[in-house]
Image: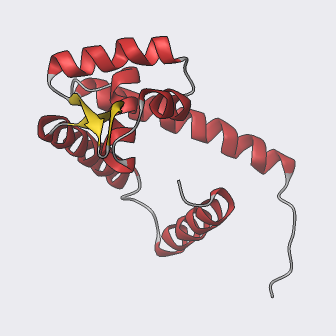
Amino acid sequence: MPRRSPPDPRVVQRFHHAAIRLLRWLRKVDEAHGFSGPRASALSVLVFRGPQSLGELAAAEGVKPPTMSRLVKAMVKEGLAAAATAPRDDRRIRIVATARGRKRMLRAREHRLDAIAKLMADATADEAAALAKAVELLERSLGSG
C-alpha cells in the first residue's frame, strides 16, 4: 500500500483557486452556447440521475422547493422537462427531462468537454498522466455522484 502524505496547504489553496477559475470559465463556455444557469444545472440532474421528485431535485441543487418549482415551470415551458406521475403512485409527481431537454444537455456537455480538451491540448505526456492521477484521487475521494 502506498505511503500517504498530506498535501502541501499551498497546493490545496492553489487547487481551490484553479477549481473556481475552471468553473467560471466553463460557465462562460455554456453562456457562449446559450445554455447556463440554474435551469441548466437542474436539467443536468434530470438527464444524468434520472427522474426526480420536486423535493429530490431541490435537495440535489441545494435550493428550497418553491425555488425549484419556479425552475421546473420554466423548464416545462421551454420543453426541456415534463412532470409525470410516478409508476404505481399517481399522487407522486416525477420531473423528467424531455427528449429535447436531454439533447440540449448532452450538446452543452459536449461543448464543455471539447473546451476542456482544448484547454489541456498542450499537456506533455507526464502532465496528462499527472492529471489522470489527480482525477483518480478526486473520484475516489468524492465517490460516485
Side of 86 where 10 appears, left or right: right
How far across and how far down the image is residue 101, in percent? Answer: 19, 35
Side of 33 where 127 appears, left or right: right
- Residue in view at x 29 percent, y 46 percent: 87
Which quadrant of the structure image shows residue 138? bottom right
- Residue in view at x 50 percent, y 38 percent: 22
Side of 83 where 144 appears, left or right: right
Out of 6 and 127, give the one closest to the viewer. Answer: 6
Side of 61 where 140 appears, left or right: right
Looking at the image, is 76 positioned above or below residue 95?
A: above
- Residue in view at x 47 percent, y 69 percent: 124
How far across and how far down the image is residue 142, in percent? Answer: 64, 56
Looking at the image, is 93 positioned above or below residue 134?
A: above
Out of 17 and 39, give the one closest to the viewer. Answer: 39
How far across and how far down the image is residue 23, in percent? Answer: 49, 35
Which quadrant of the structure image shows residue 69? top left
Q: Residue furthest bottom?
A: 1
Which quadrant holds the N terminus?
bottom right
How far across and how far down the image is residue 108, in percent? Answer: 25, 39
